[in-house]
Image (spheres, helix red, strand yellow):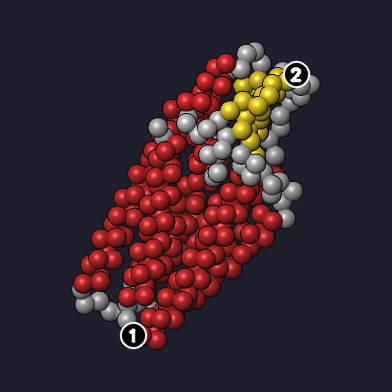
């Protein structure tokens, strides 16, 4: 078994990690991939020559460069079951609040809650692609990523259209109390997610760092919806709700394009 280290300057988020995983997925000589996003480093455990692996890394145009290759005695690579359980917990919480916020958002006529629910769904997609496609073929992984990406884009575009309709139409004010109460509960849920991830012994690993980044962003969005709810009540206007909805829909679109990048 050999161990080859690559420095990849443009590997700065989970999307690049999944992109690399998919690119290298079909190379049978690879035994394990160890990602260190913080230090832009990839360690490949493999048998045989490195040429094909190096070529594949270079073709991604992420600035990948081989640093070293050496022999290693490590031949067994066990999945971190605890890490997988933690990611499942975060996925379930995110998906549950997608349903809660989508339902209450439609009932209370709040685009902020609807948009936040789609952001929760987007996070669930990211976790799901990593968890559901484990052990699957490259074609299966790409198909899942493409479907998830296009589905997010369609939902976000529908959201943008509804925002425009409400902006120029004569709509009733959203129920600000529902906006605030549901967002507070979502904030608590995301706080629990951060606590779960922070106490993990694997929190320095790429997937766990990614999860903490996503959840931290959700906390900021939750606070934004709460502020929008207060402004709706104070100004007697639905504009703050539409503004926060537009911002979050834009974030969902951005996440969708990252996912679509994995399907190429």
Residue annotated with mark 2: 71
Which image quadrant for residue 17?
A: top right
Query: Compared with residue 239, is residue 255 higher up or lower down, i.e. above or below?
Result: above
- Give residue 178's mark: none
Quarter-of-image position of residue 24? top right
Q: Secondary structure at mark 1?
A: loop
Q: Horizontal placement of 11 versus 86: left or right?
A: left
| Left or right, 202 with reference to 124 | right
> Which mark is nearer the camera, 1 or 2?
2
Which residue is found at the position 50% from the left and 41% from the top?
Answer: 15
Left-right relation of 181 to 2: left
Mark 2, secondary structure of its residue = strand
For label 2, count other residues whose C-alpha is less than 10 Å away and answer few (under 14), some (14-19) or many (20+).
few
What residue did someone put label 1 on? Answer: 236
Query: Which quadrant: the C terminus?
Result: top left
Outermost residue, top direction? 48
220 over 229 or under it: above or below: above
Q: Give the mark nearest the N terminus, 1 or 2.
A: 2
Q: Quadrant of residue 213?
A: bottom right
Determine whether 112 is above or below 201 in the image. Answer: below
x and y, in percent, of residue 251 in the image:
42, 56
- The CA distance from mark 1 to mark 2 is 69 Å
Q: Residue furthest right?
A: 73
């Amino acid at each position: 078994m050999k161990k080859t280290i690559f420095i990849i300057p443009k590997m700065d988020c989970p999307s690049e990690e999944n992109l690399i995983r998919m690119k290298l997925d079909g190379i049978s000589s690879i035994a394990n991939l160890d990602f260190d996003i913080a230090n832009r480093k990839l360690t490949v455990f493999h048998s045989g020559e490195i040429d094909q692996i190096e070529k594949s890394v270079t073709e991604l145009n992420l600035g990948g460069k081989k640093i070293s290759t050496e022999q290693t005695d490590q031949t067994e690579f066990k999945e971190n079951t605890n890490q997988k359980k933690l990611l499942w917990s975060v996925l379930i919480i995110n998906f549950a609040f997608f349903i809660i916020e989508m339902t209450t958002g439609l009932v209370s006529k709040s685009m902020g809650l609807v948009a936040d629910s789609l952001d929760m769904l987007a996070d669930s997609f990211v976790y799901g692609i990593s968890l559901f496609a484990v052990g699957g073929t490259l074609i299966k992984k790409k198909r899942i990523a493409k479907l998830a990406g296009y589905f997010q884009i369609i939902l976000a575009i529908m959201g943008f259209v509804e925002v425009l309709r409400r902006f120029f139409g004569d709509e009733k004010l959203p129920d600000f109390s529902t906006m605030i109460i549901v967002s507070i509960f979502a904030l608590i849920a995301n706080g629990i997610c951060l606590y779960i991830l922070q106490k993990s012994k694997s929190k320095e690993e790429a997937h766990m760092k990614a999860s903490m980044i996503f959840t931290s962003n959700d906390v900021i969005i939750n606070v934004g919806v709460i502020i929008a709810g207060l402004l709706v009540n104070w100004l007697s206007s639905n504009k703050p709700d539409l503004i926060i909805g537009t911002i979050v829909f834009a974030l969902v679109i951005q996440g969708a394009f990252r996912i679509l990048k994995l399907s190429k």
